[in-house]
Image (spheres, grey):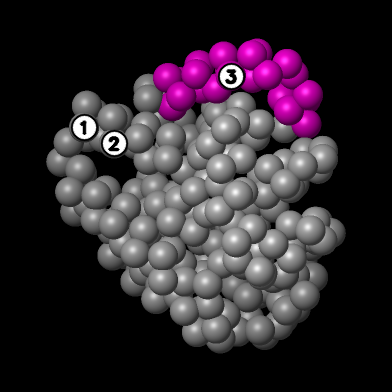
Amino acid sequence: MSSLSLINQPSIVRKLKGIKAFVTLLFDESGNLEPVWELSNSLVDSRSFQLAIATMIKNPEVANILAERYIAPPHDLAALLQYPPDSLGYTYASQMQELGLQTIEAGIEINSDTSYVENRWQQTHDIWHIITGFDTSQIGEIGLQAFYLAQFQLPLASLLIANALIAVTVWQPQTLSLLLMAIARGWEMGKNAKPLIAQKWEEAWEKPVAVWRKELNVQPVNAGEFTFS
């Protein structure tokens, strides 16, 4: 089911699907992302997302990009591999290729500030991984969600963090301390960094990742920092 079809469902249906998705994520170890999208899309018209927007627009940079509704064309990974090895474009495309990931095109109808933010964070999610240094492991993903939460109170982020805390406490208690450290690290990093949601990454693919990080005041996670051993 596409993100757009989920968004177009009646609000109560989406909320019920969101609850089901939250429970599914507690037990699903397959890595299937469909429950994540269902949970996320169930929150687009929520009060929590509206309050997040109200906070976001206090920042002029964020207010400007929300007003513009900037959305870039689909990311062409083959073209991005032609950029210099230290560039964001090359780093992003090579990492996506290495992990066997496809670019995310949410396909959400943009008719509000919340739907715009939902669309944009999905389109650029894997870029945020690169800028912050959080990997795509379970703990790395939750560390990035803490970064999202600190930056703009994304409702999905708080629910995914809550879900991970429950799941780890029940199923993998030996990793709880590591998860908590990743959450704390992501939160601190997100509070100190400039707003990533306001960036037009696609207009500066050639810029080195190190320069992006310096300009945005991001102190990235080191490789393997939250690897459980």
Residue type, label 2: Leu
Magenta stretch bounds: 4-25
Disc 3: which residue: 15
Residue type, label 1: Thr
Mark carried by residue 165:
2
Residue type, label 3: Lys
**150 or 201, nearer to the observer:** 150
The residue lying at 27 percent from left, 48 percent from top is: 179
**10 or 120, nearer to the observer:** 10
Q: Secondary structure at mark 2?
A: helix
Q: Alpha-carbon distance for marks 2 and 3?
A: 22 Å
**166 or 112, nearer to the observer:** 112
Marks 2/3 in contact by CB < 8 Å: the verdict is no
Marks 2/1 in contact by CB < 8 Å: the verdict is yes
User: Residue 208 appears at what percent x and percent y?
Assistant: 60, 84
Marks 1/3 in contact by CB < 8 Å: the verdict is no
Q: Is residue 5 magenta?
A: yes
Front tag of 1 and 3: 3
Prevailing secondary structure class for the magenta stretch in the rendered image: helix
User: Residue 97 appears at what percent x and percent y?
Assistant: 62, 59
Locate residue 20 relative to residue 82 in the image: left or right.
left
Locate residue 52 relative to residue 76 in the image: left or right.
left
Q: Secondary structure at mark 1?
A: helix
Q: Is residue 227 magenta?
A: no
What is the crowding at mark 3: few (fewer than 14 residues within 10 Å), some, or many (at least 20)?
some
* Rendered view: 194 above or below 171: below
The residue lying at 66 percent from left, 84 percent from top is: 207
Q: Alpha-carbon distance for marks 1 and 3?
A: 26 Å
The residue lying at 60 percent from left, 31 percent from top is: 46
In terms of sequence position, does the residue under pointer 2 or pointer 3 come before the other?
3
Disc 1: which residue: 169
